[in-house]
Image (cartoon, grey):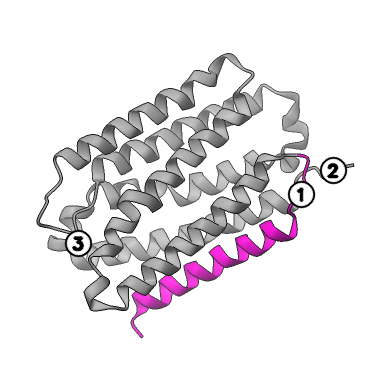
């Protein structure tokens, strides 16, 4: 078993842990969107396991990138945009996640138009970069609003705080890795592998923060 496979299994463990915690706290939180988050976490884990199944079969490996290109990555980005929209739907800034969603979908379409059709390992760097930048903007917007809100006193009871912290750790730091992925994994494979392992480690930490978002939030009375 290679070290890359070990890292993938470790990530799956933390994804499973987050799913178990989320299910344990199903319906106990006053924040109803956490139930949707529970479903999303389970879908993420299912997608990862399906991708792993594809990777173990030579004749199915070409479907692995497609699984993430057409399903795994887009639905995660759009879910988090929806999540932040739900958090600010009553504020004047509610248009921000909507505009970010439109920009992401547009970049995804552009990626599809100009993709390298004969290279199934090709990675949609443009849309992924736009998607992560969109998350960064929403996370920064949230933290700024939190600093000017009375909720900051009990910030540790706000699930969005822990989710935002997790996204900041897990997504933002890997922007260069995936924006440059099409070149790195062909010309600088060793550098890509090292950076990828760092990204996986940070993703594990992200899922710890996701788990905390269920444990440390306000419960129903």
Give the labeled residue for mark 2: 220
Start-end of magenta stretch: 1-30
Disc number for residue 185:
3
Q: Secondary structure at mark 1?
A: loop
CA gap, disc 1 to disc 2? Answer: 8 Å
Reading the chain from its start, which is encountered first: label 1 or label 2?
1
Residue 90 position within the rendered picture, expressed as x and y whole percent measured from the top left: 64, 19
> Residue lying farthest bottom?
1
Residue 160 vertical position relative to residue 28 in the rendered view, above or below:
above
Judging from the image, what secondary structure is the residue with disc 3 in? helix
Tell whether position 111 is magenta.
no
Q: Residue furthest top?
A: 92
CA distance for labels 2 and 3: 48 Å
The circle on residue 27 is 1
Q: Residue at x 62, y 30 (%)?
A: 87
Could you classify mark 2 by the number of other residues whose Cα lies within 10 Å: few (under 14), some (14-19), or many (20 or more)? few
In which quadrant of the rendered image does the C terminus lie? Answer: top right
Q: Mark 2 touching mark 3, by CB under 8 A?
A: no
């Amino acid at each position: 078993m290679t070290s890359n496979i070990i890292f993938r299994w470790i990530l799956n463990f933390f994804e499973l842990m987050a799913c178990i915690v989320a299910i344990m706290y199903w319906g106990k939180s006053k924040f109803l969107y956490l139930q949707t988050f529970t479903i999303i976490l389970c879908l993420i884990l299912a997608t990862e396991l399906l991708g792993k199944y594809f990777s173990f079969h030579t004749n199915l490996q070409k479907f692995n990138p497609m699984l993430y290109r057409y399903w795994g990555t887009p639905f995660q980005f759009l879910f988090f945009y929806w999540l932040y929209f739900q958090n600010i739907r009553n504020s004047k800034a509610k248009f921000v996640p909507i505009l970010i969603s439109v920009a992401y979908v547009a970049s995804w379409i552009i990626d599809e138009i100009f993709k390298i059709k004969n290279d199934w390992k090709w990675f949609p760097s443009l849309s992924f970069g736009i998607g992560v930048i969109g998350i960064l903007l929403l996370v920064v917007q949230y933290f700024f609003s939190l600093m000017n809100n009375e909720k900051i006193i009990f910030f540790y009871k706000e699930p969005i705080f822990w989710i935002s912290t997790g996204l900041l750790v897990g997504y933002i730091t890997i922007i260069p890795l995936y924006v440059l992925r099409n070149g790195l994994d062909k010309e600088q494979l060793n550098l890509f592998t090292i950076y990828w392992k760092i990204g996986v480690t940070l993703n594990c930490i992200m899922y710890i923060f996701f788990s905390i978002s269920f444990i440390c939030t306000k419960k129903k009375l």
